[in-house]
Image: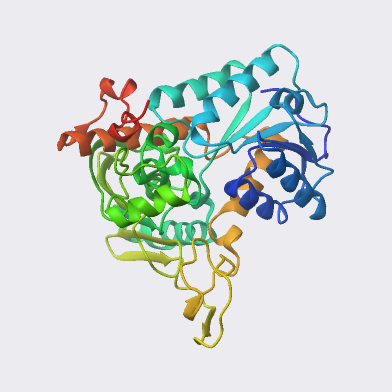
Amino acid sequence: MNASPPKGGPLRIGFVGSGFIAKFHLKAFQSVRHAQIMGVFSPTAEHRDALADAANAAELGPCKAYVTLDELLAAPDVDAIWLLAPNDRRLEVMRAISAAVTSGKSKVRAVACEKPLGRTLAEAREVLALAEDAGLAHGYLENQVFSTAVERGKEIVWRRAAPLAGRPYLARAAEEHSGPHEPWFWQGARQGGGVMSDMMCHSVEVGRFLLTAPDAPRASLTVKSVQGSVAHLKWTQARYAKQLARDFKGVEMTRHPVEDFARATITLEDEDGQELIIEASTSWSYVGPGLRIDLALLGPEYSMEFSSLNPGLKVFLSRAITGGSGEDLVEKQNAEQGQMPIVEDEAGIYGYIGENRHMVDCFRHGRTPIETFVDGVEVVKMVMALYKSAETGATVRLPDETLETYVPAPARTEA
């Protein structure tokens, strides 16, 4: 690991990427101590300038918008990079970071990367190798693991119930919304697939986290087999395919379809050989108040449940109240009238505050995060196995060497 910043000083961070997820992280950092957003790079000048202005307005800087990635990496006041670029640019950016650090052109010592770590297992393994070869500390940004409900629920179950009744054996996770806002999410080659690639990475990892004993390493659970299925429920229908083509240049769901529904069953074993199960489903074809995350953890004499759309705060707006559409109540909001739930602290409830606070603390003090690129590789391995199972219609048993070169079917349909 590279040298730490001056003792007691803040972690000085550079953002690579200025899209939707970068804005979420910026909001979360307003609740994180000992961190400064010193720079941002993205190819679009308007976007990077706007994000830098927002960081400065929130007094998180001083933040500078950089014209090139090399300039950001060479900045003397950047200790860590938050890699928030689109999926098809993650490996390219990581190669640049590793090269700049190993050549001595960059003082960056740590990198945190958004999900997924790669579009394929080969990409994810290279991202991990590049970080380790450069001596970089690394953290995998899986926000649901740091959700306030997940952290509190897991703590209670494992402290109060598991010692008396036995460990939990079944985790359920579901995440769904009405579809992404950016065109590259709908392009299989750029994104890596469809909703399985985009959202199942959340569900399988939060399930694995909940089933792992608090003081045990994640490797204490071994994935034995996976069964996956996908479907094209809504967005390949003619009217909706036309809508996407109209709204997003280059998105052609008729010629290059990607799945908008995915289901997974993952069988694991703990250190004692006990069978454990993760059941998960993800969807871009859900129409409701907005993003819905449902989680459950079950054991011999207990259960835990959480739903993001069952908050304590709700509003009702009659049809007499009209206005423009937006997402001021909940992410992926689909209505502006009627009774609607309000997720009053999305950055905290979804886990963005917790994950950023944890990564900053670990990088400042030389500790290993609970989510690293090693975990990111394992997540991609599970997702690739699920895609292969969906394609072949068969259970995939691990280890499976063919996953090392496997490319999901929807990612193979475009040049």
Question: In this image, 165 relative to 2: left or right?
Answer: left
The residue at 40%/36% (across/down) is 379
Q: Nearer the viewer, residue 361 or 346?
A: 346
Asked if 405 appears above or below 20 in the picture, the reply is above
The residue lying furthest to the left in this view is 394
Asked if residue 206 can be seen in this view, the reply is: no
Q: Position of residue 257 (x, y in %)?
A: 30, 41
Q: Nearer the viewer, residue 315 or 325?
A: 325
The residue at 47%/72% (across/down) is 335
Q: Position of residue 67 (x, y in %)?
A: 75, 30
Asked if 189 appears above or below 275 in the picture, the reply is above
Image quarter hosting the N terminus: top right
The residue at 53%/84% (across/down) is 317
The residue at 66%/37% (across/down) is 44
Specify the quadrant of the image occupied by residue 393.
top left
Question: In this image, 233 relative to 370: left or right?
Answer: left
Q: Nearer the viewer, residue 362 or 243?
A: 243
Q: Position of residue 127 (x, y in %)?
A: 51, 24
Asked if residue 23 can be seen in this view, the reply is: yes
Question: In this image, 190 relative to 39: left or right?
Answer: left
Q: Nearer the viewer, residue 248 or 137?
A: 248
